[in-house]
Amino acid sequence: MAEQAINNNDTSVQDEWGQICSQLKLEFGETAYDSWLKPLTIGSLNNGVMNICVPTTFMKNWVITHYSERIHKIWEHKNPEIKQVNFVVQTMNSGDTSLLKKIVSTPTPQNLYVSNYESAVNDYIRPDSSSQLSAPLNPAYTFDTFVVGKTNEFAYAAAHKVAESKNVSFNPLFLYSGVGLGKTHLMHAIAWHIRQQDPSRNVIYLSAEQFLYKFVKALRYKDTAAFKEQFRSVDVLMVDDVQFMSNKESTQEEFFYTFNSLIEEGRQVIISADKSPSDLEGIEARLKSRLNSGLVADIHPTDFDLRMGILQNKARQMGIALPEKVAEFLAQKITTNIRELEGSLRRIVAHSQLLSDREITLDMTQDVLKDMLRSIDRKTTIDEIQKKVAEYFNISVKELQSSRRARTVARPRQIAMYLAKQLTSRSLPEIGRKFDRDHTTVMHAVRKVEELIVEDTSLAENVETLRRSLEN
Ligand code: ADP
Ligand code: MG
């Protein structure tokens, strides 16, 4: 076969892949991205067929069912030359899978560090021993770097108390908030604190997705006994983003089992999610009630003071002079979440440093963040989109949000979802929530409308008219 291996200089395809990765991260969230998509590498391109390398067959199947269609769509959109996306299992440069099997069956320090093996692959393939059970912790996420304000003081106090106490105080501690408001930061901070105070305590931090992955892998290698064994010696178990467990019954079952036995043995369990236990969908009732049985603490959206505090703190850590005016401007404009606030500060700092330490000013800030600010100024909200679309199609907003599937309602609903994706910076799950649907429904709607715009000119015109009226 005359396959052309991608040359590393082929920056355009590499660039495209980089952009696709960023988009996938936005759409599916960081956890899913880190678990399933980050280990992918682009392979060869042959007659419009793009080969993407996956480290294991299991991952390949998972990626095909969950992500391939989206990857293909985005790529095709960026580069019409790409007709098909293929996934191939490529474990080693040599393509030698026997070594892989050896690693799985006999973990020795040598074969855990096979040199030409991607580190990501190592993480995914090597059997877990309890020391490797925990996901890595971000050194920047400590209590010291966590700025406390009115909106997060309760969650902070609860987290701090749990980290300080030798005996279990609230079990489980359940933290919840919207994205980018500090749940993961607080969990890592607890882990760092305990590890520092008493290194003999075994603290495990995992995302629910990683828990799921490890469990499914154990099932696959018929090694569930070893999986359970790993949790025996755990003193503190933290599972981040448990909303990822919704509708995955067997994992929930296993998690429930692990979780109950740890709590009964007096070990500390800390859980986070994007909703309160009662509002979590697709989670079994007895698991919900167990999650509710300890202390539930939520982090509210930020207020101006907290945003100012965070900006000043960050600027201090980065060793830069951030004029008060610029901080105020950012704190007023960027209200969505802390991740975006930090992102905008990083952009400004990078810009000033690249231009040989140009001073940070309000003008420069407005210039660097122009695109972002424009979309904020437009301030199109999902509520507005729903209202306009409902009016336009002569239905009520209630109907738009209902479960009715009649075409006259379903099509406007898809259009509203599409416009929400296009005109706001809301994530798919956030949009879904406004329509009482999950993110896959929104994704489907977006794709459907994208297709229809090409096929159906009158629909395309309707969408365009709506877009213009919303953008004004
Ligand atoms: P979540 O897990 O709720 O989505 P993260 O914990 O990942 O949010 O927080 C997003 C970013 O914002 C991280 O870089 C984190 O360090 C930062 N952050 C969140 N809350 C605070 C805070 N109170 N003080 C300082 N930084 C914060
Ligand atoms: Mg998080």
Image (tube, rainbow, N blue to C red):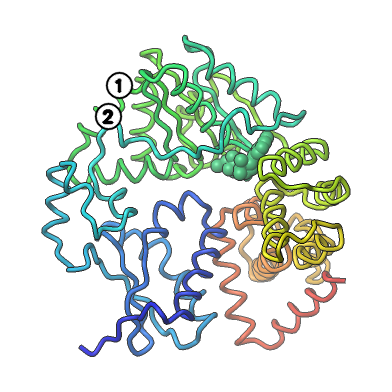
Question: Which amino acid does the dot numbered 1 rest on?
Answer: Ser
Q: Give the secondary structure at mark 2.
A: helix
Q: Looking at the picture, does residue 457 appear above or below residue 124? A: below
Residue 274 in view, yes or no: no
Residue that numbered label 1 is attached to:
233
Residue 226 in view, yes or no: yes
User: Which labelled disc corresponds to residue 390?
Assistant: none
Residue at the image position 24 percent from the left and 60 percent from the top: 116
Sort mark 2 into few (<14), some (14-19) or many (20+) by Cα contacts within 10 Å: some
Q: Nearer the viewer, residue 348 or 91?
A: 348
Asked if the residue under mark 1 is in contact with the one under mark 2, i.e. CB atoms within 8 Å, the reply is yes
Tell me: 89 left or right of 185: left
Residue at the image position 75 percent from the left and 63 percent from the top: 372
Residue 422 lies in what quarter of the image?
bottom right
* Ligand 2 lies under 8 Å from the Cβ of mark 2: no
Q: Nearer the viewer, residue 448 or 370?
A: 370
**Residue 72: where, in percent of width, then height?**
45, 75
Tell me: 203 left or right of 21: left
Q: Looking at the picture, does residue 19 appear above or below residue 226? A: below
Question: Which amino acid does the dot numbered 2 rest on?
Answer: Gln
Q: CA distance from mark 2 to mark 1?
A: 7 Å
Q: Looking at the picture, does residue 49 appear above or below residue 449? A: below
Image quadrant in which the N terminus is located: bottom left
Q: Give the secondary structure at mark 1.
A: loop
Q: Nearer the viewer, residue 22 or 93?
A: 93
Residue 202 lies in what quarter of the image?
top left
User: Which labelled disc corresponds to residue 230?
Assistant: 2
Sort mark 1 into few (<14), some (14-19) or many (20+) by Cα contacts within 10 Å: few
Query: Ligand 2 sits in which quadrant?
Result: top right
Residue 159 lies in what quarter of the image?
top right
Q: Residue furthest top?
A: 167
**Residue 249: where, in percent of width, then height?**
38, 41
